[in-house]
Image (cartoon, grey):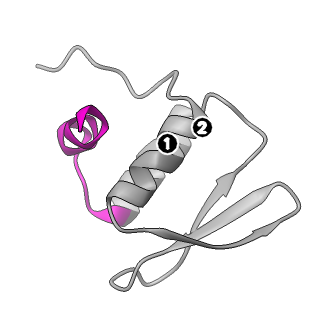
Amino acid sequence: MSTKHLRNIELKEFRRFLEQVGCRLIRQKSGHEMYSREDLLRSITLQSHISPVPEFIIKNILRQLNMTKEEFFEELEK
């Protein structure tokens, strides 16, 4: 069982994670950043004015990326 939690992930660190998994920033508009990747059906929207990133947003983005929590933490450690 993992003792790591999805809360308190800083915005800067989460942006770095998105870039590591192949997402690229496609646009910014009024406090939101849109990221895209070729295999995604829709873009990932991230609020750029809220840090740390809320846990429910991280969970939704991980679901969209088809990643587990463990895979997320492995990427963060790289």
Q: Relative to residue 59, is residue 48 drawn left or right?
A: right
Residue count near mark 1 (Cα–Cα under 10 Å), binned few <14, some 14–19, many ≥20: some
Residue 44 is one of the magenta-drawn residues: no
Q: Residue at x 36, y 53 (%)?
A: 62
The residue pinned by badge 1 equals 14
Q: In the picture, which quadrant includes the N terminus?
A: top left
Residue 5: horizontal and vertical position, in percent? 35, 21
Q: Secondary structure at mark 1?
A: helix
Which amino acid type is shown beneath numbered disc 1? Phe
Residue 55: horizontal and vertical position, in percent? 51, 33
Q: Secondary structure at mark 2?
A: helix
Residue 41: horizontal and vertical position, in percent? 43, 84
Residue 41, compared with residue 35, is above or below; it is below
Q: Relative to residue 3, is residue 63 drawn left or right?
A: right
- Labels 1 and 2 touching (C-beta < 8 A): yes
**Which residue is nearer to you in this view: 14 or 1?**
14
Residue 24, compared with residue 1, is above or below; it is below
Q: Residue at x 26, y 34 (%)?
A: 73
Q: Relative to residue 77, is residue 45 drawn left or right?
A: right
In the current view of this chain or complex, which residue is farthest to the left? 1
Q: Residue at x 76, y 59 (%)?
A: 32
- Which segment did they paint magenta? 65-78
Q: Disc 1 versus disc 2: distance between alpha carbons? A: 5 Å
Residue count near mark 2 (Cα–Cα under 10 Å), binned few <14, some 14–19, many ≥20: some
The residue pinned by badge 2 equals 11
Q: In the picture, which quadrant includes the C terminus?
A: top left
In the current view of this chain or complex, which residue is farthest to the right? 30
Which amino acid type is shown beneath numbered disc 2? Leu
